[in-house]
Each structure stands twice: as structure tokens, then as C-alpha cells.
């Protein structure tokens, strides 16, 4: 992806059986358990002719994580890697604006 030497805002949602972390690269903004019905996802993907990216996600409660950060062009040169977070609890970023 070309970023024209400017910072790029990245917004990524992940859905997995565990809460994920992206180290120092992307900041976790929210994480919570969500019930997923793969039949509904499969039907939605079939209608849009998209690949079945959710085929391996088991039915039931999964962790939906939201990551959002601004990365420089230099930071964009490396792949983003997600690992299991140290805990699996829900999280919501708190912002106080004066």
C-alpha cells in the first residue's frame, strides 16, 4: 500500500476466540465478546461473492477487537502481526475531553 510519505490512519477489526494484541503498532480501542452465527456470515458472504473468510470461526461467543492508530510511512513498511493478549477480558477505551 502506498502512503505517499504521509501518516495513514489504520482501523482494523478482528474476530477470534481470544482477545488480540498488536504490540506497540496498533492501539486496542475496544474488545468484547460477541455471539457469532457462522451460517448468517456465510450467507452474507455468499451474496457478496466474497471468500468465506469466516468459515473457520466456531459458532458461539468470540472476541471482537477494534484497533485504530495513525502509522507513519516508515511504520507501514512492516506487516501488522496480531498475538493473543495477556488477558481475555473486555476493554473499552476511555477518553476525557476538556
Image: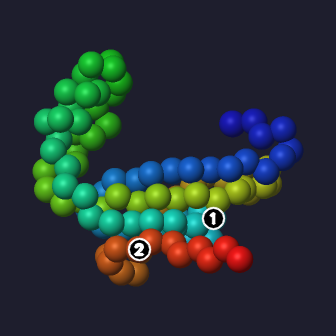
Which quarter of the figure has residue 63? bottom left
User: What is the CA distance from the residue labelled 2 to the residue labelled 1?
Assistant: 18 Å
Q: Secondary structure at mark 2?
A: strand
Q: Crowdedness of circle 2 by 10 Å Cα count: few (<14), some, many (20+)?
A: some
Viewer-closest of 97 and 3:
97
Viewer-closest of 82 and 92:
92
Q: Which residue is mark 2?
A: 91
37 lies above or below 78: above
Q: Which mark is residue 25?
A: 1
Residue 48 location (% of width, % of height): 33, 20
Q: Residue at x 27, y 19 (%)?
A: 47
Q: How is the image coloured?
A: rainbow
Q: Is residue 27 left or right of residue 77?
A: left
Residue 61 location (% of width, % of height): 18, 60
Q: Quadrant of the C terminus?
A: bottom right
Q: Judge depth for marks 2 and 1 and give the one in front.
A: 2
Amino acid at each position: 500500500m502506498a502512503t505517499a510519505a504521509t501518516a495513514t490512519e489504520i482501523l482494523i477489526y478482528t474476530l477470534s476466540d481470544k482477545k488480540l494484541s498488536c504490540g506497540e503498532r496498533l492501539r486496542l480501542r475496544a474488545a468484547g465478546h460477541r455471539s457469532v452465527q457462522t451460517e448468517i456470515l456465510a450467507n452474507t458472504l455468499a451474496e457478496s461473492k466474497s471468500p468465506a473468510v469466516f468459515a473457520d470461526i466456531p459458532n458461539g461467543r468470540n472476541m471482537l477487537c477494534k484497533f485504530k492508530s495513525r502509522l507513519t510511512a516508515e511504520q507501514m513498511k512492516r506487516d501488522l502481526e496480531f498475538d493473543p493478549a495477556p488477558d481475555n477480558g473486555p476493554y473499552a477505551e476511555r477518553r476525557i475531553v476538556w
